[in-house]
Amino acid sequence: MLNPISFHFVAPSFALLSYNSLVYPFLLAEIRMVLVGKTGAGKSSLGNSLLDKKVFESNTFGISSTNTCELGERHLQDGSKLVVVDTPGIFDTRNNITETSKEVVRCIGLSSPGPHAFVFVLKIGRFTQEEMDTIQHLKDLFGDAVVNHVIVVFTGKDSLDSEGSTIHQHIENSPEQLISLIHQCKGRVASINNRAQSSNLHVDVAAILKLVGQTIETNNRSHYTEEMFNKANEAIQSKIRQQEEEKMKAEQEILRREQALEERAREIDAEIEKGRQLERENELRRQEIEQRTREQAAHVRRHHRRHRRHRQQCVLQ
Ligand SMILES: Nc1nc2c(ncn2[C@@H]2O[C@H](COP(=O)(O)OP(=O)(O)OP(=O)(O)O)[C@@H](O)[C@H]2O)c(=O)[nH]1
Ligand SMILES: [Mg+2]
């Protein structure tokens, strides 16, 4: 059982803080964020909200709109450059893992020398098996160490508002995998309505930027590195190799069983043929015995007739 989650939710006074700054007493020349999540989670919309302009294409018809990783940037009030990398639904588990890895390498390249924060984007609503798989996929691709840089952001906050529900209630009713991820990333959760009017939008953006600042501080200003990715990549490559070996072994086993079945089928056919041959031989033998019996009976009858005639001749003489 997991401990109750402590959230880094923003206090009401935070509304006074600027969406234009990390509000942390440090200055980094560049702050890099990568937005990851399932297709349609709201990554591109969130990217636009963070950048305060429409940089990324967002879809409205439920069709996947981002096909490759893209980059957008703006300057924050404190002078740092905010770099946001939008990704396609690379965590869409329907996609082939090798293709996914290639695109991930590109997104790591765009955020070079490495992102300070991975924003794991989820849409408020039913948390499906696909989303659960996405969490594992995130760890598989970037390694377990990625959680140190993860911020969970729920889009579609407006649907909660219209239901009169809160993000706390939504999380409390979420499956254990998600609660566990939130624990691992030290309760760094935020929610946003990307369709809100700019003043409300800025409050949500400010909350997310504050979490980015906390992430950077917690990691002593270090970012996720290429070495971490290479390590995770080696692990995933070995996992892929292992899966391929297991698949090959399974295919060989199926082939071996098919061959054994074919062999057994041939043996059964041969046994049936042998049985039929025996039946034919038995039939021939039976016919021979019948023939011989008929011939012997005929011989005995001829012999009796001859003997009777001989006795009648003797009586007549
Ligand atoms: N109501 C509401 N709709 C949102 C919100 N955020 C995103 N959307 C909508 O959700 C849909 C998908 O958003 P996108 O930003 O394109 O999602 P994505 O994750 O980039 O999708 P892919 O590029 O296909 O992976 C769009 O119709 C957005 O307008 C939100 O906070 N509230
Ligand atoms: Mg997109």
Image (cartoon, helix red, strand yellow):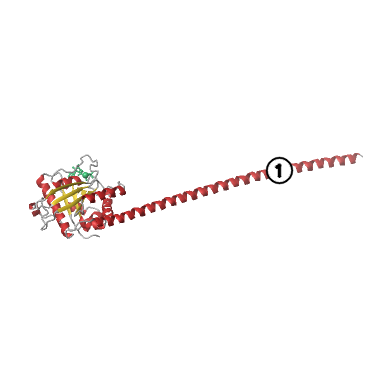
Q: Position of residue 187 (x, y in %)?
A: 19, 57
- Within-10-Å neighbours for mark 1: few <14, some 14–19, many 20+: few
Q: Position of residue 226 (x, y in %)?
A: 24, 55
Which residue occupies the foreground of this view, 246 or 25? 25
The residue at 65%/45% (across/down) is 281
Which residue occupies the foreground of this view, 7 or 103? 103
Q: Position of residue 250 (x, y in %)?
A: 41, 52
Task: Locate the C terminus and report the quarter of the image it occupies.
Answer: top right
Q: Which residue is mark 1?
A: 290
Q: Amino acid at mark 1?
A: Glu
Total marks shown come to 1
Q: Quadrant of residue 218?
A: bottom left
Q: Quadrant of residue 213?
A: bottom left
Res. 236 in view: yes
Task: Locate the N terminus and report the quarter of the image it occupies.
Answer: bottom left
Please state if 186 lies on the left or on the right of 252 as rendered. left
